[in-house]
Each structure stands twice: as structure tokens, then as C-alpha cells.
Amino acid sequence: QITLKESGPTLVKPTQTLTLTCTFSGFSLSTSGVGVGWIRQPPGKALEWLALIYWDDDKRYSPSLKSRLTITKDTSKNQVVLTMTNMDPVDTATYYCAHSRNDYGDYKYYFDYWGQGTLVTVSS
Amino acid sequence: QAVLTQPASLSASPGASASLTCTLRSGINVGTYRIYWYQQKPGSPPQYLLRYKSDSDKQQGSGVPSRFSGSKDASANAGILLISGLQSEDEADYYCMIWHSSAVVFGGGTKLTVL
């Protein structure tokens, strides 16, 4: 059974750095064809993809946010960490992590299991 | 112009069918893309429904009923999620997703109302 859970601060101040942790079970991020991604959703708005880390430590980032994002993994702890610098009120959103996989052998993974998400509010 | 455009809302009656469209930006050929569909109910994370590229290259998500299916309309340059035999529990937001230029792109979502 695959499960994921996001954790981190619920409130950050503008210009601060956000660090979110995704702790998962039911799979290993060292297994070929597996990845973990981060997706966010501002209140009442659409999903926005942020980043994806692959089993081989390859990484992909949203082009519009790439300069602010870093994704890393700790395979031994079954965790993936996302950092986002220079937070702004427009970054207020529910942040989801998701198990990712691919049936084709390329980098175009999809998200088949999602965590419940964590709401992060950016306000002074 | 957004890469993926979805109508903001759609209404349909119980028992009827609903076609949710995901239109790709001009210049991006729908025929070359795998289109993924997600369902999100209020207060819950998205759930993976299915993937569709062609009739010979498609995948149903685990446990997803067969009344959810994918297709494409090449003339409209759009992916389609067809939901047949609508039920009240199908009322939700639906998002399409593709990989474009080495990045994941989500559509703006369609709110489906069953009434």
C-alpha cells in the first residue's frame, strides 16, 4: 500500500524559505521507474506542477519556478524534500507530494498516488 | 495562450454522458501527446483516472470504472474525457495533464456538476 504524507510549516513570512518534507511508504525511491513529485494548488485554483525527482536522482523543475526550487531525496529515510526560496503571498497553496511512475521508460512520469496535502500560508 | 485549456464548468444530468475537453494550444499536435486525467473532489487530493494517447495506447487507473474513458478529437486538437452513466458521485473537478517541453503542464480544470 503506497502512502505519502507532507509535512512542514503552515505559516511562513514573505521572503522566507519554505522547506517541505514528503515521507512515504509502500515503495522505494531506489527502484527503477519510480519518482516523487510536488504539485501545489492555491485556494480555489488549479493544480500547478513544481518538481519531480526520479529514482536515479534525475530532477525536473517547473520552468517558471526553477530558480526558486530544490528537490532532494533521502532513500534511506523514504523522504523527499522540497525547498522554495523567497516566498510570497501568491505562493499560498496546498502543497501535495505524489508517487510517480512511467510505463514507457522515458522521463514522462505521471502521478498515481497523492498525499493529502499541506496548506502553506504566506503572510507577515 | 495557455498550453492546455479546459472549460471552467460543465453540467449534465444523472445517467447522461459528459465529454470534458482539454484543448491543446495551437501548434501543439494532440496526436503526439499522452493525456492524463485526474478527478478531484472537494477537500481531497486529485485521483488518477486514466491515460490516453490512442486506442492502442491507453491505460485505466487502478479501480477506475470503465464508464470513464479517454479519446481525442484531432480536428479540435483536444483530448476528451468521456464519462458515461453519470452519477452524483462524479461531481468533481477534472484536470488534464501532459508533458510539454520537458515539463508537466496541468489544464485549468473543469468543474462538473451533476444535476
Image: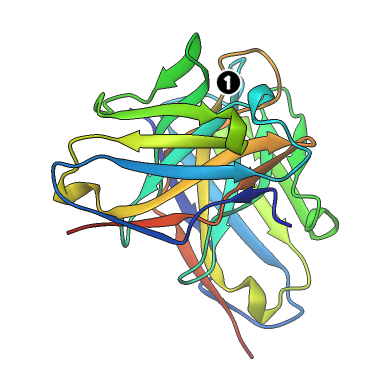
Is residue B108 something that shows in the picture?
Answer: yes
* Residue at 76% over, 50% down: A70
**Helix or strand or loop: what does disc 1 sit on?**
loop
**On the image, numbered disc 1 is attached to which residue?**
A102
Q: Nearer the viewer, residue A121 or B3?
A: B3
Q: Residues within 10 Å of mark 1 (few under 14, many from 20)?
A: some
* Residue at 58% over, 20% down: A102
The part of the image, by quadrant, that contains residue A9 is bottom right
* Above/below status of A32 relative to A46: above
The part of the image, by quadrant, that contains residue A104 is top right
Percent position of residue A41, x then y: 53, 62
Is residue A80 something that shows in the picture?
Answer: no
Q: Residue furthest front?
A: B75
Percent position of residue A77, x then y: 55, 36
* Residue at 50% over, 8% down: B56
Percent position of residue B66, x then y: 26, 23
The part of the image, by quadrant, that contains residue A11 is bottom right
